Image (spheres, helix red, strand yellow):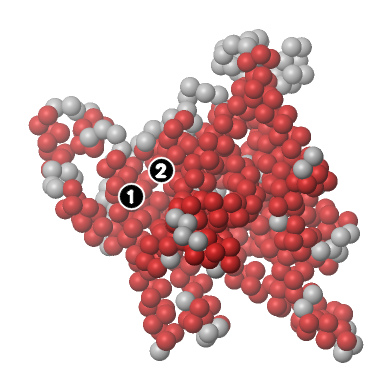
């Protein structure tokens, strides 16, 4: 019962955050310089006052501001973000077309970073103070300082331009008939560089977190007890140290996965990856604020959703959690 | 020499960071002397590779000197990084101090606000803010500050929550000191060392955010920045790799220097924490 109440509270909080994001977005659209009706009419090639009035009425811009806000929030609740000024289509359709590409990219990047981070972190901790630890720690330090969009460009320069191993742009090879397997392999090939680039920063984070976590668990009493019992070293690592050190890292990392969607803008722009990050960049260039803010809301929704899932998992795994809340 | 300086001198990463950072600051200060005039102007033949005579880092498609851009860009990167961090730290310390000292409903509201800003994707928010308020120095600094202050607020609040219980604060309260006096002169000085460590890391992340923004074309067009140079050189990557490679290296070295410097500060200011990290 108490657990249900806790989860209900979390759900209410998540909805409040999304509501706040929506209100903020509405405020930002309205704060954009220039009267939106004039801008819209201008985009459609007319500065005729009568036409501007028509546009104003069509988009409800002649209504009082609180009514517009209410309409916007009610629309977002039904996933109706209005029309894109530039594409003359519902924003949600545009996002729906592009979202799968972003999910493929971010999830691949996340899994690569997590796997790499766990391996590197455990390796460093196992050899703490010796050269593998030094190399890995320095590598993580260097990765942290790299601007990702630049890494992407340099990867294109090396692997596409110089070596010709991997495609540099897009998600598919255009104009070639392919079997379903061939098409999957083609996408996978296009995916390597952007996913590795996007994953690099998280790789550094997970490496550091894993190393610290393993080092902490290694010093705990039950590990000493296991050694004193004369357990085999391999077994101590697998059953005692890794299990206890890695689970929190995996949970914590999954919690952050929602942030990847919003973080993909630069990577998608560099690699012309047809996801919502690239769409956001195009919206930016075309001053299509309705579309830009919708992507912003969706990216925030991903973070909120992942936080909610993490809360759910935590409360199932540990019934005491509601006390802390 | 103070104890602080002596210990900092012994931190290897801190010293490397400090030396790199000082070099960058000198570059920024003397950019006008070494490369006088507008870095945007044409200085030589177009597309000269690095180490050409008179052009250490080569020239771009319009014959502009890349080295001049790097030097003048250092000024912008450091300036925006420091300015936005100062604003973010100001806001963060204020919010964290008020929340941690007052507790109750004020604390609750301020922490909800902080969590809200930590939840929304920060780079996306920075893009949206700069795009809508049009890219100027002011809007860029403000946008980076808006997405950067929450960790400071949480840190300061946590420090205040513990320090508030300590005897010397209780003594000040009993002694009839005013609240603002207690906050400013008793608690805040004791809460500052972790803030200082976080501040140097914040300048680094601010520089990364700024470079990303100007790469996307969201920089102030009156000033040359490293991110802009990478963005402009991007289309030329097949023919003139140095146009995007060199400014990226500059960003990398700057951010690395700040991170190393921060690590050095952390070794000195939180020795207990750092030692347990190392073993």
**Marks 1/2: CA–CA distance:** 9 Å
| SS for dot 1 | helix
Q: Residue A256: percent from the left, percent from the top?
A: 55, 62
Q: Residue A206: percent from the left, percent from the top?
A: 67, 61
Which label sits on residue B128? 2
Chain name for mark 2:
B
Quarter the N terminus of chain A occupies = bottom left
- Residue B174 appears left or right of B112: right
* Of A187 and A294, the residue lying toward us: A294
- Residue at image position (83%, 54%) is A134
- Residue B272 appears left or right of A185: right
Contact between marks 1 and 2 (CB within 8 A): the answer is yes
Q: Which residue is mark 1?
A: A25
Chain name for mark 1:
A
Q: Can residue A311 be seen here?
A: yes
Classify A36 as above or below A273. above
Q: Can residue B235 be seen here?
A: no
* Of A272 and A11, the residue lying toward us: A11
- Residue A293 appears left or right of B30: left
Q: Residue B30: percent from the left, percent from the top?
A: 66, 19
- Residue at image position (30%, 54%) is A23
- Residue at image position (23%, 30%) is A42
Q: Are marks 1 and 2 on the same chain?
A: no
């Amino acid at each position: 019962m108490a657990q249900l109440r806790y989860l209900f509270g979390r759900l209410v909080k998540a909805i409040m955050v999304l509501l706040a994001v929506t209100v903020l977005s509405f405020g930002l659209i309205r704060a954009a310089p220039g009267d939106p009706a004039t801008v819209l009419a201008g985009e459609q090639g007319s500065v005729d006052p009568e036409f501007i009035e028509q546009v104003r009425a069509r988009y409800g811009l002649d209504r009082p501001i609180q009514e517009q806000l209410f309409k916007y929030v009610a629309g977002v609740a039904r996933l109706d973000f209005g029309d894109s000024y530039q594409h003359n289509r519902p924003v949600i359709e545009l996002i729906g077309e592009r979202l799968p590409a972003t999910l493929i990219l971010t999830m691949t990047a996340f899994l690569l970073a997590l796997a790499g981070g766990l391996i590197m972190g455990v390796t460093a901790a196992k050899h703490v103070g010796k050269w593998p630890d030094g190399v890995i720690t320095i590598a993580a330090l260097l990765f942290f300082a790299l601007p990702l969009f630049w890494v992407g460009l340099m990867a294109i320069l090396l692997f596409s331009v110089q070596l010709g191993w991997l495609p540099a742009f897009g998600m598919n090879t255009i104009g070639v008939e392919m079997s379903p397997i061939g098409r999957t392999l083609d996408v996978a090939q296009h995916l390597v560089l952007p996913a590795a680039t996007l994953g690099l920063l998280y790789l550094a984070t997970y490496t550091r977190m894993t190393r610290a976590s393993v080092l902490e668990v290694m010093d705990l009493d039950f590990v000493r007890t296991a050694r004193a019992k004369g357990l085999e070293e391999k077994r101590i690592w697998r059953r005692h140290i890794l299990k206890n050190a890695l689970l929190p890292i995996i949970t914590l990392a999954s919690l952050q996965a929602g942030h990847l969607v919003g973080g993909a803008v630069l990577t998608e722009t560099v690699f012309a990856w047809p996801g919502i990050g690239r769409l956001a960049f195009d919206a930016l260039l075309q001053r299509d604020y309705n579309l830009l803010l919708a992507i912003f809301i969706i990216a925030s929704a991903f973070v909120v959703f992942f936080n909610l899932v993490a809360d759910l998992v935590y409360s199932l795994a540990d019934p005491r959690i509601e006390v802390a809340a | 020499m103070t104890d602080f300086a002596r210990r900092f001198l012994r931190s290897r990463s801190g010293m490397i960071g400090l030396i790199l950072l000082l070099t960058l600051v000198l570059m920024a200060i003397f950019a006008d002397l070494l490369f006088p005039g507008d870095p945007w102007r044409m200085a030589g033949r177009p597309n000269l590779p690095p180490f050409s005579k008179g052009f250490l880092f080569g020239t771009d498609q319009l014959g502009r000197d890349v080295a001049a851009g790097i030097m003048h860009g250092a000024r912008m990167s450091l300036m925006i990084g420091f300015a936005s961090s100062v604003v973010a730290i100001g806001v963060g310390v204020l919010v964290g101090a008020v929340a941690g000292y007052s507790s109750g409903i004020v604390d609750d509201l301020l922490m909800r606000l902080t969590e809200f800003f930590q939840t929304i994707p920060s780079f996306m928010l920075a893009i949206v803010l700069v795009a809508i308020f049009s890219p100027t120095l002011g809007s860029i600094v403000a946008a980076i500050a808006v997405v950067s202050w929450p960790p400071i607020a949480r840190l300061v609040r946590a420090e205040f929550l513990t320090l508030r219980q300590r005897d010397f604060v209780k003594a000040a309260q009993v002694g009839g000191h005013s609240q603002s006096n207690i906050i400013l002169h008793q608690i805040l000085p004791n809460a500052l060392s972790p803030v200082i460590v976080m501040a140097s890391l914040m300048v680094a992340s601010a520089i990364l955010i700024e470079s990303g923004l100007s790469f996307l074309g969201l920089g102030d067009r009156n000033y040359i920045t490293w991110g802009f140079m990478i963005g402009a050189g991007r289309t030329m990557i097949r023919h003139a790799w140095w146009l995007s490679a060199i400014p990226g290296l500059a960003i990398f070295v700057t951010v690395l220097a700040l991170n190393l410097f921060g690590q050095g500060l952390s070794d000195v200011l939180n020795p207990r924490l750092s030692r347990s990290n190392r073993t």
